[in-house]
Amino acid sequence: MSTAKDLFIIAMDPESEHPVGQGDLSLALAGAELIDLIGAGAATLDGDRIVPGEAPVPADGLLAEAASALTRRTPYERVEDWLWRRGRDLAAAYRAALEEDGQLTRTRGGRSPFRADRVEPADTPDRRRAVDRLERNEPVLAVLASAVGLDDGRSGAEPEPDPGDEVVTTVLAVVHDAVMELEAVRQRRSLESAAFANVWRAP
């Protein structure tokens, strides 16, 4: 499976201590797709701009969609802009695709029949492989997981990609910055909402 699908499966782990925000996950999934496209020769970077490659369309359906979504005219798209554009609702797309493939299963969210169903990874070889990649601290997956808060309970040094692979390092850094930017937006909106509520409570 793709790095993005491995990341999504890990994010759905019911044993994770902290739920992952859909916006954070969508940005990281877009970054994972780009890294896989670069690895497959379907794209590369010129500075911070994504240059489409000549490799065949990936067999993975969502990666094929990502490849077809690359901007093919100069000036090429910046990595940051790609993350925000491609990442829009991307977590929902991965959830639907993985459910269709049988990689996710629905479980009842409690004893009450009125509780909403919860989606969890099915016990498949793909899930076990994704978990194994994370437990081995495979650099790209580990950094993406850490960016969205999925580094609970793992010890050792902070994972780092191969320092010689500047392209992957660039993508991972932009993913981290985008997730931080999204969190800053959330905090600002929370403060604005609290201030507005206080105005109405004032005597």
Image (spheres, rainbow, N blue to C red):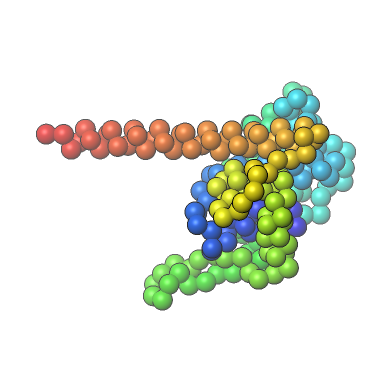
The answer to whether residue 47 is above or below residue 176 is: above
- Furthest residue toward front: 156
Front residue of 8/156: it is: 156
The answer to whether residue 106 is above or below residue 63 is: below
Q: Residue at x 34, y 34 (%)?
A: 191
Q: Quadrant of the C terminus?
A: top left
Q: Residue at x 40, y 32 (%)?
A: 188
Q: Is residue 29 visible?
A: no
Percent position of residue 186, x then y? 44, 38
Q: Residue at x 78, y 43 (%)?
A: 37
- Image quadrant assignment for residue 177: top right
Percent position of residue 69, x then y? 72, 40
The answer to whether residue 117 is above or below residue 160 is: below
- Image quadrant assignment for residue 133: bottom right
The answer to whether residue 186 is above or below residue 46 is: below
Percent position of residue 179, x then y? 56, 38
Number of numbered discs overlaid on the protein picture? 0
Front residue of 159/198: it is: 159
Horizontally, residue 178 falls left or right of residue 53, namely left
Q: Residue at x 84, y 36 (%)?
A: 53
- Furthest residue toward left: 203
